Amino acid sequence: MSYDVQLFRIETRQREEQSNDPDFFEKEDYLVPFSADQIKALTIRLERYKFVEERRSTFGTHFHNDQYGISALLTDRAVYFQSGWDGDAIFELSMTASEFTDSGEFAKYDRQNNGWED
């Protein structure tokens, strides 16, 4: 079992809030793609937070933070953060994702904590 948090463009949040589709997140076309500049900025920011690129796959770029045991998958439409149920890892994962929203262009979604963060 894992703790999962996602980071999307703010426009994805707006679409989801206007949608009546319970499977919204399962439909890739609903998720607004990141720009090339956003992907670059997200990559740099992950590295600043001590995430190390592990590999690239057809899904995206896989990162890992060894200090807290947090993984991140950067795709063209989202950043998927994941950790175990360790309290420190959950705290760091949640704080990191929240801090990534400071520019106003991204939104954090946490299913385990009532969805969108304001």
Image: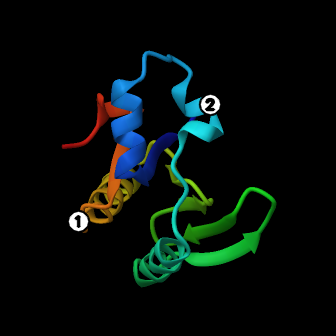
Q: Could you tell me which quadrant the C terminus lies in? A: top left
The amino acid marked with disc number 1 is: Asp
In the rendered image, residue 16, in percent from the top left (x then y), is placed at 41, 31
Q: Is residue 76 above or below residue 116?
A: below
Q: Say which quarter of the image contains residue 45.
A: bottom left
Q: Secondary structure at mark 2?
A: helix
91 and 27: which is toward the camera: 27
Q: Is residue 33 above or below residue 40?
A: above
In the rendered image, residue 72, in percent from the top left (x then y), is placed at 56, 61
* Residue at image mark 2: 26
Indicate left or right for 16 with 103 as reference.
Answer: right
Bin the neighbour count of mark 2 within 10 Å (Cα to Cα): few under 14, some 14-19, many 20 and up.
few
Q: Is residue 87 among what the camera can see?
A: no
Q: Is residue 95 among what the camera can see?
A: yes
Q: Residue furthest right?
A: 58
Indicate left or right for 7 with 115 as reference.
Answer: right
Could you tell which of marks 2 and 1 lies nearer the N-terminus?
2
* Residue at image mark 1: 102
Residue depicted at 45% across the width and 42% down the height: 85
